[in-house]
Image (cartoon, coloured by chain):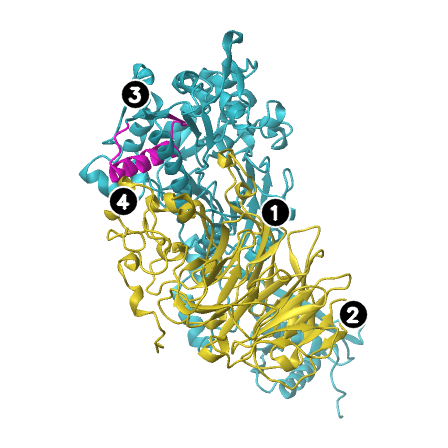
Amino acid sequence: MPEIRVTPLGAGQDVGRSCILVSIAGKNVMLDCGMHMGFNDDRRFPDFSYITRNGRLTDFLDCVIISHFHLDHCGALPYFSEMVGYDGPIYMTHPTQAICPILLEDYRKIAVDKKGEANFFTSQMIKDCMKKVVAVHLHQTVQVDDELEIKAYYAGHVLGAAMFQIKVGSESVVYTGDYNMTPDRHLGAAWIDKCRPNLLITESTYATTIRDSKRCRERDFLKKVHEAVERGGKVLIPVFALGRAQELCILLETFWERMNLKAPIYFSTGLTEKANHYYKLFITWTNQKIRKTFVQRNMFEFKHIKAFDRAFADNPGPMVVFATPGMLHAGQSLQIFRKWAGNEKNMVIMPGYCVQGTVGHKILSGQRKLEMEGRQVLEVKMQVEYMSFSAHADAKGIMQLVGQAEPESVLLVHGEAKKMEFLKQKIEQEFRVNCYMPANGETVTLPTSPSIPVGISLGLLKREMAQGLLPDAKKPRLLHGTLIMKDSNFRLVSSEQALKELGLAEHQLRFTCRVHLHDPRKEQETAMRVYSHLKSVLKDHCVQHLPDGSVTVESILIQAAAHSEDPGTKVLLVSWTYQDEELGSYLTSLLKKGLPQASS
Amino acid sequence: MRTEVPGYRDQRGPSHTGANRCNKTGSPVGLAPEPGPPPTEPCCHSRVLTALECCAPCDIVSLSCRYQDFHAFDLSGATRVLEWIGDKGVFVAEYESLKKNEILHLILPLRLSVKENQGLFPERDFKVCHGGFSDTSVFDLKHVPDTRLLVTTGLPGSYLHVWQITEDSDVIQAVSTIAVQEKEDSLWPRVAIFSSTTPGVLHGVRLSSLRVVDLESQKTTYTSGVSDSEELSSLQVLDTNTFAFCCASGRLGLVDIRQKWAPSESVSNGRGSPGAAGGRWCAEVGGKVRSPGPSVAILGSNGQLCLLDPRDLCHPVSSVQCLVSAPSPDPELLRVTWAPGLDNCLAISGFDGTVQVYDTTSWDGMGSQVEPLFTHRGHIFLEGNQTDTTPLVTTHTWHPHKPRTLLSAASDASLHVWDWVDMHASS
């Protein structure tokens, strides 16, 4: 039985390690290779030993696909490819390919330099891993091998995020990764065509959530910044290299313009600039509005936002600074934080998630006295704010995407089954599809019924049409022909054509059957009796008595012979071709019943 | 069809022309207690004004000074139900005919549950805690206190549906039905719950069909026993033995179920009494029933609002005209609610896309026009989809503990949680 098998290797509840194994028509694909941000031990990475107990991963997996650059989707990649060992292709979009190594290196620095972890992947490993990456364009069908093909669709969420369709023959699976069904200020909404996959694997981290509107989030953010600036305070916004930083820049720029505010806004040199560089590079991945503005002027070159110089931090008066890194674990953002932390007029706004062990994580969990390097204690008097701008699909978004793709079944990952029974029912009711929610390590098996297209020759079709009545679309009809399977191509042709094409000589297949009759008379007389019996029974057929004493019914030949040992018994030899099998068997069964007693 | 209601014309003064335009004439219309910024359009400071005037009314800037907090959500369908369960949960339910209607138990955003320094709390989303599907439209839903049971009513109105919130999953399951005595095609039974050791479901379409059914045994424990066929618009249980009813005509009464039907009632022909003015009505009795003063508010579809003392329902304490632009297009959606945490404060909706908050303290006379303390226009200007019709507010409710926080829902399936700023108090 052909089937699709899906096993999530690790998709925790909150900030999970996304990693899903899919087997489709004999091909094995690994979707995402994420790490868990909450763990420092083995649980950080997915359990790759599950994939294959013995043997190399490269032999087992046909390819690996990475949906986007967030670490919970790609953080385990260097570990997987360089430390566990995988040399096959890794597919991701161009922006993901550009940004992924930056974030991996950033993360490696925190783990090794800050937390002093040993046995972690090295910078060289990240580089070697990235060499195995094959970058793909949106809507480009990529042939992984002769049978396996993949195609990327726009997912919104972050720059370069993609949903992937994995297809083998007529069977397909769509994996969404993280996606967002409502457009941002800088990204568009996820979109997929009506590709009707056998299975749609969708993230469901926010499936039980009804999201607060973007506008209200922005209102709060602007209100906080505005209040701080009005009272003369300095605002620090630590940002990740990419993602929300650009959005917040656009937001503040617009607000400053409208409100005619004069306080300077800076963004730190280095990563944010690099990030803007990538956005410019991948402008086609942003939303339409930005693309349009880009023709007139560069949307990411701001009027009010200027490059930061470290000397500016000591300037008097209010200011807003975007600085990297986002988790306050090193570099410029941490330097500025140390300078400003002591003043209660100032404010730090954390716009994203912080890994345990970072200053960002500490202040967000309410810590007010921080031990810095050299046993120095830093007292945090400045206001600490958290703003979540994460762009995930909520229950409504998931329903929208299922409606777009029209899959035959849906699989939810990243969620808690007990809390999602209602959503499962909702999906099953609204779309009349099955919905699965496997736990980590649990395999969902979907039987598929692959359809095999067969071409039929016009000649054969015409001949069949000529023979019978007009075809009825709703009724199956029997048709004889020869199936030629050549180059994974199926054709049904007439047997004559098949013989001609394949250069074969025609073989005759004859069946011969002996029927014993109790009849002491001569063979000729027996044959005569057979003839008159059949003639009377088979009125519609052409029954003949040939000069040589044999009887024919159509192409079926009947000869009578004497029995070698028993003179009271005659043997009837019945012989027919394969084509007349039906009549042949009927005749034999008829003759086996014996002949009617002669009236004489 | 537009009924001429006293006071409509005068309201289109400068203070009413735009959602966020400030009144530069400085002469507020109506009963503003003191000069200064007009009560309906307060703004922070002059620089905010500049920004406001040059941009669309939907701008985020305008939201920052009028609200302490503002969250906007999109439900999958519009709700007429906002029923509290505890102070962190709320039920919503869809009311469309010929479709599966969702009943959801939502958990309020976490940041609403904390008092100070909300900044650290990231959770600003609703969580769907439980959900179920109803084959009929849900017009009203009551949670039976201290149980996992719900009672819903709607059209077709031949049954009330009883639901249970399952313990081991997130599903709300149908458990039983309660047959309604008088079956009518276009009317649906009103419901209220007597919560005691054996909860009773008070319901009825008309005064004559009023009864209490014991939820467990399904036995009828009380019937009104009258032949009065006046149509009901709202029912409210006040304590273990009393309930209040309001008829669509504006007739009001308090009933003691221990006694034979002899409600203390309003008279329909008294001066300033609701019934005399026509239209359809709904009412709410405030929490302080036993204390002196007007605790009954009754709202008419033309915008009249009367306050009554429950001990003397015959003589309204005050009767005013609210600042509404037109009679309610759907009187079924009329809502009047007393603020549980503020003295003499109430909110009304059901006329358009707004929710108005009024301070009733200084109301005295009859027929005078009053201005709201605050008007929530979020459902109009935060509208996501560009549609021709502006959404109509379907219901609203006050947060049980946060004094100035309200929840409101509209016909476009939006659900707002907002904590308004009393500009009077701050000025």
Nearer-the-camera pick, A14 or B357:
B357
Nearer-the-camera pick, B122 or A88:
B122
Q: Which residue is mark 2?
A: B217
In the image, is A544 to the left or to the right of A215?
Answer: right
User: Most extreme residue toward the left, as rendered?
Assistant: A296
Q: Colour of chain A?
A: cyan
- The residue mark sitting in front, 2 or 3, is 2
Q: Residues within 10 Å of mark 1 (few under 14, many from 20)?
A: many
Nearer-the-camera pick, A272 or B12:
B12
Picture disc at residue B49: 4
Residue B380 sits in which quadrant? bottom left
At label 4, which amino acid type do we have?
A: Leu
Is any atom of residue A557 visible in this view?
no
Q: CA distance from mark 2 to mark 3?
A: 74 Å
Q: Which residue is mark 3?
A: A308
Q: Position of residue A199 (x, y in %)?
A: 52, 50
- The residue mark sitting in front, 1 or 3, is 3
Q: Position of residue A305 (x, y in %)?
A: 27, 29
Q: Which residue is mark 1?
A: A437
- The residue mark sitting in front, 4 or 1, is 4
State which region is magenta. A234-263
